[in-house]
Amino acid sequence: MNYKRIVSCSPAHSEIICLLGRQDLIVGRTAYCNFPKDLLSEKPVVGSWIKLDNDLIEDLKPDLIITNNIVQEKIAKNLKEGGFNVYHSDPLKLEDIYLDILEIGNILNEKIRAQNLVDEIKLQLEQIKINKPSKVFKPKVYIEEWHDPPTVSGNWVPELVEIAGGDYGLIKSGKRSMPISIDKLFEYNPEKIIISWCGFGEKVDTIQVLNRSGWDLLDAIKNKQIFVLDDNLLNRPGPRIVEGTRKLQEIFFSKVYVK
């Protein structure tokens, strides 16, 4: 089918569509579909991550709605039951992200551009892996996706950590992000703590983490090795994971405290 009117409820897919040069097809987006800003700022906002205005979506007359992640699974189901054509994806590993981009390329009749984009992501990640400053030193890392309760980043993040040159022994690739017990965290005793809370961007006050009861015994806290990384660069299953991985590597091999 030749789609002409797409409502993207997925920030990652909005980015992918724009990079494939088909932002003209997007007739609606969520408030979180904010990159590239200059290409999306004029698009109507149909809601947030989990709250959508179905009446507005209907008025936009989309021939395809894109949703993403287990959080939007129920939304996708309800939209389908409402008669909308929906593409839903839920990538858990890097390979899933690549396949998802290729499928979007197929949907948009942009197969070559999609393949080129995937090839470029793979190439850049490989370059980051090759260029890591140390082949021996691998800092133990804890990346926190959410704060209440403290939740360790899973999905494809463990793969990005490995590429960047870190040790991520708290969760395996392909496992969904999950709350972490204090005992497990203390047993692992990370040397670097990276805060990447969903929806916060870089607007995180690390004092909240530094002041957690008992956390001052962790090496990362004692040595002030706590960093903030824009969650859009890690948690969105799209092309900017390259930028996120590059920033991870900078953090892993830096001794500077970053707020």
Image (tube, helix red, strand yellow):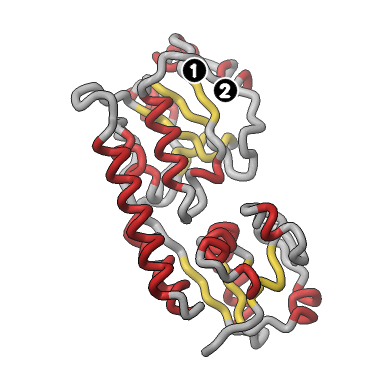
Quick one: label 1 or label 2, which is nearer the N terminus?
A: 2
Residue toward you, 146 or 88: 88
Residue located at (52% from left, 90% from top): 1
Where's residue 230, x and y in %? 56, 38
Residue located at (60% from left, 80% from top): 64
Where's residue 147, x and y in %? 57, 34
Instruction: Name the amino acid, label 1.
Output: Trp
Q: How many badges with numbers are in the image?
A: 2
Residue toward you, 259 or 142: 259
Q: Dot 2, how many residues are within 10 Å of its Cα: few (below 14), some (14-19), or many (20+)?
A: some
Quadrant housing residue 94: bottom left
Residue toward you, 191 or 44: 44
Q: Which residue is mark 2?
A: 209
Q: Is residue 149 visible?
A: no
The answer to whether 164 is drawn above or below residue 259 in the figure is below
SS type, badge 2: helix
Mark 1–mark 2 contact, CB under 8 Å? yes
Residue located at (59% from left, 58% from top): 11
Q: Is residue 37 visible?
A: yes
Query: In the rendered view, does 23 fall on the left or right side of 181?
Result: right
User: How far separated are the C-alphas under marks 1 and 2?
Assistant: 8 Å
Instruction: Name the amino acid, label 2.
Output: Val
Name the quadrant of the C terminus.
top right
Query: In the rendered view, does 100 fall on the left or right side of 205?
Result: left
User: Which label number is shown at residue 215?
Assistant: 1
Q: Dot 1, how many residues are within 10 Å of its Cα: few (below 14), some (14-19), or many (20+)?
A: some
